[in-house]
Amino acid sequence: MIRVLTLPVILLSAAGCASAGPAENAPLSTELSNKPDSAANMVPPGFGSLRQDEIAIRLEAPGLVLRAVPLDEGIIRLLTPDSYRVLRELQESNRPRIADILRRNGGRQPALWYVSFYGLDPDTRYSPLDLVITSGGRDFRAIDVIPLSAGWGEQRLRQRETQSAIYIFDGEIDTDHPLTVRFLNERDESWEQTLQRIERERALVRARAGRAEK
């Protein structure tokens, strides 16, 4: 059974973001990565130009909009510096809770996603654990969830209200290949196109970083 932890609201905006911490502290998503090709996909932070919406998977279901962003370090380093710092801090501020969840699940490597639900109607009931990611022919549901907003456990949305959380999946979700996201009867298969955008930006970041070193 998934145990939900109650946490205060964390706003994903650059304006209230704390610093990412000392440079010598490795990003949590780098430490947790078990993908053999993760090092090849890593680029220096601070040179990206993508917006969060450009790597987000968006689904519209009855009464709500779901938005899912992978917190893979090799991907979020392609975001603008402010967006990267926000998502990095989101993980770092929850490092102890993530570590505790890993211990309770046998230490298996996780895949972390930031997931938000936005209400379109005055009162929408929903089950946040109906989110399914299909990768490599397998279906994955969150093994645990860390809420980031008050009222998460109510499983209801008011109009224009946002509820958000960090979802922790089995680490075998491979964001380097096409995947499908499903919620209720809705599905999204746009990640294959997003990967093309990611690869283009990765090449641009390497070029920018190279020029900066000269």
Image: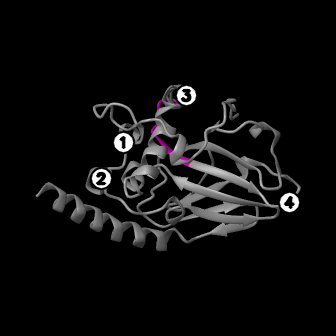
Along the polypeptide, which appears first: circle 4 or circle 1? 1
| Residue hosting label 4 | 121
- Residue at 36% x, 49% y is 35
Q: Who is closer to the viewer here, 76 or 86?
A: 86
Task: Give residue 5's quadrant in the image.
Answer: top right
Pointers 4 and 1 in contact (C-beta within 8 Å): no
- Residue at 32% x, 64% y is 202
Q: Which residues are magenta?
A: 105-113
Q: Is residue 73 left or right of residue 173?
A: left
| Residue hosting label 3 | 97
Residue 62 in percent (x, y) is at 81, 64
Along the polypeptide, which appears first: circle 3 or circle 1? 1
Mark linked to residue 30: 1
Residue 6 in percent (x, y) is at 69, 29
Q: Callout 1, which amino acid?
A: Thr
Mark linked to residue 42: 2
Structural distance between the alpha carbons of marks 2 and 3: 25 Å
- Residue at 47% x, 35% y is 18
Mark 3 or 4, which is nearer the eye?
A: 4
Structural distance between the alpha carbons of marks 4 and 1: 38 Å
How is the protein colored in the picture? one colour
Q: Which residue extends farthest front? A: 15
Residue 145 in percent (x, y) is at 63, 38
Along the polypeptide, which appears first: circle 2 or circle 1? 1
Q: Callout 2, which amino acid?
A: Met
Q: Callout 3, which amino acid?
A: Arg
Structural distance between the alpha carbons of marks 4 and 2: 41 Å
Assign a secondary structure to mark 3: helix
Q: Callout 4, which amino acid?
A: Asp
Pointers 2 and 1 in contact (C-beta within 8 Å): yes
